[in-house]
Amino acid sequence: MSDEKRFDELLIKLSQEIQQVKDNPISLNLATSATTSAIQTYIVTLTEPTTVKNVEVRLFGKTGVITSGFSDLGKLPVDKKREVGEQRKQTVEALQVPIRARTSELQAQALEKNLTTQAVDVTLPVREAPAETGRVHPITQVTDELTAIFADMGFAVAEGPDIETDDYNFTKLNFPEGHPAREMHDTFYFPPKPDGSRLLLRTHTSPVQVRTMLRQKPPIRVICPGRTYRSDSDQTHTPMFHQVEGLVIDKGSHLGHLKWILEEFCKAFFEVDNVKMRFRPSFFPFTEPSLEVDIQCRRDKDEIRFGEGDDWMEILGCGMVHPNVLRNCGLDPDEYQGFAWGLGIDRIAMLKYGMHDLRAFFEADVRWLAHYGFRPLDFPTLAGGLSP
Ligand code: DAH
């Protein structure tokens, strides 16, 4: 006979015995009867919390054997109530105590099992934390890299607005009236104001030089990274791009300092011990003399290696700040002199990390970013290494 069947029979027996005690109270002690102790034994053998619950329901539920068997207590004469009540209480306890005990035993067993099967294996490799699944855009990474390098040389970071005045973007920087960069098709202009002046999207970071000189007395040693805009679009040009400007103004700053700074920068940024550099004469309205700088490289099929080979790659423009610019910014060119340079951040990012199409930088394609982006916690430092 199955255990459940046996339990069914025990219940029938129990309800018969309840009836028997009602007819003849001294014929049986229900709390210690053979039926009650058989039910107690059955409860101890149960292995599932649900079957214990079932036993409880069938004894003490709404239509349970005990509930219905003992439901006449209120109707008993007062003199009997107390005595019968006391006996029944003992029977109830005799059955309830093992149910409670078994329930908590099974709960403890289940908890123990969970603790062993769901234990944390501390030897498992770390899964990527949510903060690690995002990627830092190469522009941000390279801006952080070059900021770390120049900060180490004592440069502060200066910033200016993307929307500039024509005066700061061109006039104070010594651009003559008819200069080609001022053409409508090269520069994004806002509609003219009533006084005829026009705001524009800055075409370079050089207006931040002007703002810095107007605001602060020399010695000045700043870099100015930021967004710049020109009406241009192909594989290596986008309407918005990024530059970093450098500016040093002091009493004795000269081209030798400029060359040393740029050489140190290139070695640190491209992470090579030595790199030959070539300074070629050039022209910018805001510098005199003006120079363009090439760095030594080797082109291997699709790859470019810096600091080796005998090819050259142009990377930046620079020069001594033009006396007119110093004057326009309230500095006396007989007292102060300095130098400046301008560098395309996107361009050096492409060169360092082997990216070929600048337009992909701004298409917000997460697959591209997952491939070319950087882990957010690997930020560049000179001590820890620039590129991860
Ligand atoms: N402003 C120049 C450009 O956008 C870059 C530049 C060249 C900046 C020479 C300088 C400099 O400060 O000295 O092409």
Image (cartoon, helix red, strand yellow):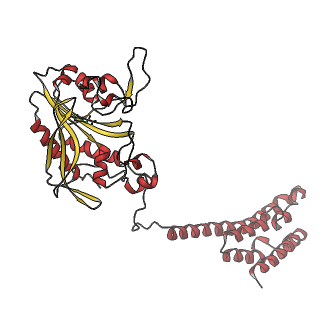
Question: x and y percent of residue 257 in the render?
Answer: 11, 38
Q: Nearer the viewer, residue 60 or 220?
A: 220
Q: Residue at x 77, y 65 (%)?
A: 57
Res 156 quadrant in image: top left
Is 94 above or below relative to 237? Answer: below
Q: Quadrant of the C terminus?
A: bottom left
Q: Is residue 52 above or below residue 381?
A: below
**Residue farthest top in this picture:** 195
| Left or right: 82, with 231 as reference point | right
Task: Report the residue at 16% width, 56% height from top.
Answer: 310
Residue 210 rendering spot, x and y as whole percentages: 25, 26
Q: Which is nearer the eye, 187 or 164?
A: 187
Across and down, in percent, residue 126 comes to 40, 62
Outermost residue on the bottom side: it is 1
Q: Nearer the viewer, residue 264 or 107?
A: 264
> Looking at the image, how many numbered discs can be counted on the residues?
0
- With 168 as the anchor, is 67 left or right in this view? right
Where is residue 328? Give x, y as percent: 22, 20
Using the image, determine if residue 145 lies above or below residue 214.
below
Residue at screen point 90% across, 57% down: 75
Residue at coordinates 39% horizontally, 32% vertically from top-left?
Answer: 185
Q: Quadrant of the N terminus?
A: bottom right
Compared to residue 165, the image places residue 91 above or below, namely below
Ligand 1 picture quarter = top left
